[in-house]
Image (cartoon, helix red, strand yellow):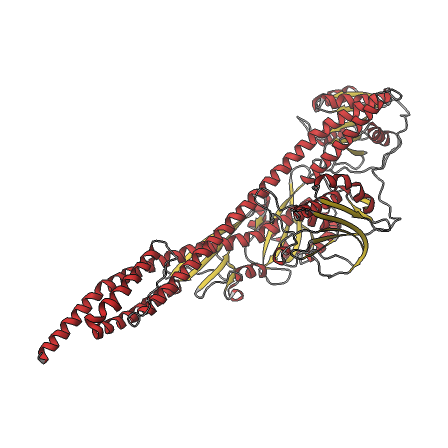
């Protein structure tokens, strides 16, 4: 073969090799184009998701501030007209919330009190600010804009909630100024890749928090974004519509960095492939070029179709092809990792939505429970009242024991309604001095019914009386929840031991809920021989809605309610557990001395007979309840004028104005509530005494007027309690008190 023929042959071989590589080149370029487009779409989806997640985290912080404001506006110190009471409360609240700069109250558009006093001129302009007006107008929590705090000169943000008085009028706001550091901390937790910024902005696009370089950008106006950026925004909206937004920007170059790197790698590999094609020619083309490229093409197509488990297994191929396969595998692994991360984020979002729905269900159940308890109290009052009347007429009859059982059943029903009202937060806890030894022993029968037959229950009381100040029903709830958890931890049976002892605790001791003060405590420990708890679960035990039980078998609120009761009682909690060796939950309540005396304001009094035949105006819309109360009063020697509605009561009052000594009225009635009726009649006759009765507290505002003698009696009540309250108002000339329910 001549030199010219060799040249031509080599030229043709090289041409055929180059032609053979053309399909692979086209496939790779097409795949890269698709991959770049998908990379952009994934980046856009990712920043939307991160933006929404960051907005949700920021909303959680503002929801917490709202819950604090909602709690504060209901406190007597805030509702009071005495700024000194309010001033005494707010510094302690501020200390308990270190992320807050100041907490203050305005009433009638003027400063009322503050946790930290500042120049009144600095607060004089607040009523003219948009957030202040929104809180007054909407009667909801309003969020302000970026400002420099007059308290410490640092950037802050104001949140305000209206104060509604008993007449339903807005008389002011309670507001909290929060620093921007917690907002920046939340933004910094996003762990964003290079080239990405995350910012929290207000209505005027001023930056409240930013990552990275948060401190340098605080208070600056967010510049308009260029076309080279990928942008996503999400409103920060939980239970509070803050008006704020999360804005996230990703530089286009950063978003496409991986795709660009892959493109460069593929370009290098293609060059190597062309050189190898020229050198190997027809001999190595089939084995070392076409087949590997075909396999790699198949992998990329599977990845493009959504099969993220596809991986290249090319070995011993032409130089550069193995590297190309490794790059594709790396790309596939990264895609799979991102897909899993997106799946986890979606799962967390669904879990958050489920917890929200569950909390809304609990609130609905609480409202229903309050309504049921209120109506049930009316029925119990009728049952107990007529039973007492029958017992008075059958003191020596054979059926007196049956009547006594009816009375006891009514008392148990009253305890049930108290629990319902406590669950619905319509009734405060009633702390009492208890010997936990005796209290827990009395619960033995109830606990024996809730544990299974293959579980033994042992109660070991303290050697001396274990006195503590706590609501007995809350003690029952704590013990029952801990015993139920212990039972569920022993599916194959075992033993539960309840120990009571006196211990000394110190502030700062390691505990799930450390003690707030050093001193003597009464320890109530529940120990089981069950499966124990893993260390990573222990840290979440007292979180609301956290449960390790199967769906539908646990609400995750048992230990959360225990934690809430212990916090309210200023106690402590410790957990001692190890997988396979059982668990011990120890609850510590502050001990009280044996000679500690609980206020006896509510103790039943001996009812003296009326010195004169006094006239009582009885107003109650429930016919049976009105009848039994009238009978009780009539048998005690009082003259009773009964009315079904407030309008009837007003007519009777006009007819017998000079004779009526006491108004006995229900709180919730059609036409007009009890306080409004009392206010109208007291205005006509200031010396009129008023006795309010109601199924639950929380529904009566303060009765205006400084000369009115008033009392409140909770349903269900006995004739003894009723007559004692009436006698105290009419006969004993009790000191004046305002009634708040």
Position of residue 502 relative to residue 386, above or below, is below
20 on left or right of 591 = left
Residue 116 showing in the rendered view: no
Q: Could you tell me which quadrant the N terminus lies in?
A: bottom left
Q: Is residue 262 above or below residue 364?
A: below
- The answer to which image quadrant residue 365 occupies is top right
How far across and down, in percent of the image, does residue 561 sit? 68, 46
Quarter of the image with the C terminus is top right
Q: Name the image quarter holding residue 663.
A: top right
Q: Point out residue 107 in the picture as x, y percentages from the top left corner.
A: 67, 47
Q: Which quadrant of the structure image shows residue 215?
A: bottom right
16 on left or right of 210: left
Q: Residue 13 in the image: x percent, y percent?
A: 16, 71
Front in this rendered view, residue 543 or 306: 306
What residue is at 55 percent from the left and 52 percent from the top? 59
> Compared to 3, does 655 lie above or below?
above
Question: Is 290 on the left-hand or right-hand side of 110?
Answer: left
């Amino acid at each position: 073969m001549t030199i010219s023929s060799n040249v031509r042959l080599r030229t043709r071989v090289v041409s055929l090799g180059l032609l053979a590589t053309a399909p692979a080149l086209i496939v790779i370029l097409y795949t890269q184009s698709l991959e770049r487009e998908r990379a952009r779409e994934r980046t856009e989806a990712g920043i939307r998701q991160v933006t929404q997640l960051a907005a949700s985290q920021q909303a959680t912080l503002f929801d917490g501030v709202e819950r604090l404001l909602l709690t504060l506006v209901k406190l007597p110190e805030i509702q009071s007209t005495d700024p000194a009471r309010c001033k005494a409360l707010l510094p302690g609240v501020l200390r308990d919330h270190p992320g807050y700069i100041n907490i203050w109250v305005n009433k009638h558009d003027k400063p009322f009190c503050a946790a930290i006093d500042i120049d009144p001129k600095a607060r004089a302009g607040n009523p003219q600010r948009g957030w202040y007006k929104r809180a007054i107008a909407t009667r909801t929590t309003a969020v302000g804009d970026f400002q420099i705090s007059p308290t410490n000169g640092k950037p802050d943000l104001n949140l305000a909630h209206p104060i509604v008085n008993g007449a339903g009028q807005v008389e002011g706001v309670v507001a909290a100024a929060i620093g921007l550091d917690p907002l920046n901390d939340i933004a910094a937790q996003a762990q964003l890749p290079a080239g990405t910024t995350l910012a929290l902005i207000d209505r005027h696009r001023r930056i409240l928090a930013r990552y990275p370089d948060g401190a340098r950008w605080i208070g600056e106006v967010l510049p308009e974004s260029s076309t080279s950026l990928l942008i996503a925004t999400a409103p920060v909206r939980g239970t509070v519509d803050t008006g704020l937004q999360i804005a996230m920007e990703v530089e286009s170059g950063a978003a496409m960095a991986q795709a660009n790197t892959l493109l460069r790698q593929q370009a290098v590999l293609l060059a190597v492939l062309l050189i190898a094609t020229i050198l190997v020619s027809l001999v190595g083309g089939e084995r070392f070029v076409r087949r590997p490229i075909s396999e790699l093409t198949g992998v990329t197509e599977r990845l493009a179709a959504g099969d993220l488990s596809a991986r290249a297994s090319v070995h011993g191929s032409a130089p550069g092809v193995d590297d190309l396969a490794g790059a594709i595998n790396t790309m596939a692994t990264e895609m799979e990792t991102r897909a899993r991360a997106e799946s986890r984020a979606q799962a967390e979002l669904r879990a958050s939505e489920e917890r929200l729905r569950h909390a809304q269900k609990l609130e609905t159940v609480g409202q229903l429970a309050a309504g049921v308890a209120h109506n049930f109290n009316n029925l119990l009052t009728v049952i107990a009242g007529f039973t007492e009347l029958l017992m008075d007429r059958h003191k020596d009859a054979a059926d007196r024991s049956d009547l006594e059982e009816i009375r006891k059943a009514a008392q148990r029903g009253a305890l049930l309604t108290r629990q319902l009202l406590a669950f619905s937060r319509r009734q405060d806890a009633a702390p009492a001095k208890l010997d936990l030894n005796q209290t827990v022993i009395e619960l033995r029968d109830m606990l024996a019914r809730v544990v299974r037959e293959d579980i033994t229950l042992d109660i070991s009381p303290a050697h001396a009386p274990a006195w503590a100040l706590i609501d007995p029903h809350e003690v029952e709830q704590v013990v029952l929840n801990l015993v139920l958890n212990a039972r569920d931890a022993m599916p194959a049976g075992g033993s539960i031991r309840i120990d009571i002892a006196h211990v000394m605790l110190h502030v700062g001791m390691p505990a799930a809920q450390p003690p707030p003060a050093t001193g003597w405590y009464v320890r109530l420990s529940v120990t089981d021989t069950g499966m124990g708890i893993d260390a990573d679960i222990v840290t979440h035990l007292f979180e609301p809605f956290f449960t390790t039980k199967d769906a539908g078998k646990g609400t995750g609120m048992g230990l959360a309610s225990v934690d809430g009761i212990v916090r309210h009682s200023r106690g402590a909690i410790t957990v001692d557990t190890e997988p396979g060796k059982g668990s011990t939950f120890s609850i510590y309540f502050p001990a009280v001395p044996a000679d500690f005396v609980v206020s006896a304001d509510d103790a039943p009094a001996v009812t003296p007979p009326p010195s004169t035949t006094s006239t009582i105006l009885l107003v109650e819309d429930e016919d049976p309840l009105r009848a039994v109360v009238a009978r009780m009063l009539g048998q005690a020697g009082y003259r009773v004028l009964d009315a079904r509605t407030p309008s009837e009561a007003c007519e009777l009052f006009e007819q017998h104005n000079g004779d009526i000594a006491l108004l006995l009225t229900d709180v919730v009635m059609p036409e007009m509530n009890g306080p409004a009726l009392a206010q109208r009649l007291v205005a006509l006759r200031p010396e009129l005494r008023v006795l309010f009765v109601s199924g639950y507290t929380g529904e009566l505002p303060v009765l205006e007027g400084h000369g009115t003698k008033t009392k409140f009696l909770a349903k269900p009540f006995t004739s003894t309690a009723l007559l004692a309250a009436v006698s105290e108002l009419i006969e004993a000339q009790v000191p004046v008190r305002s009634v708040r329910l």
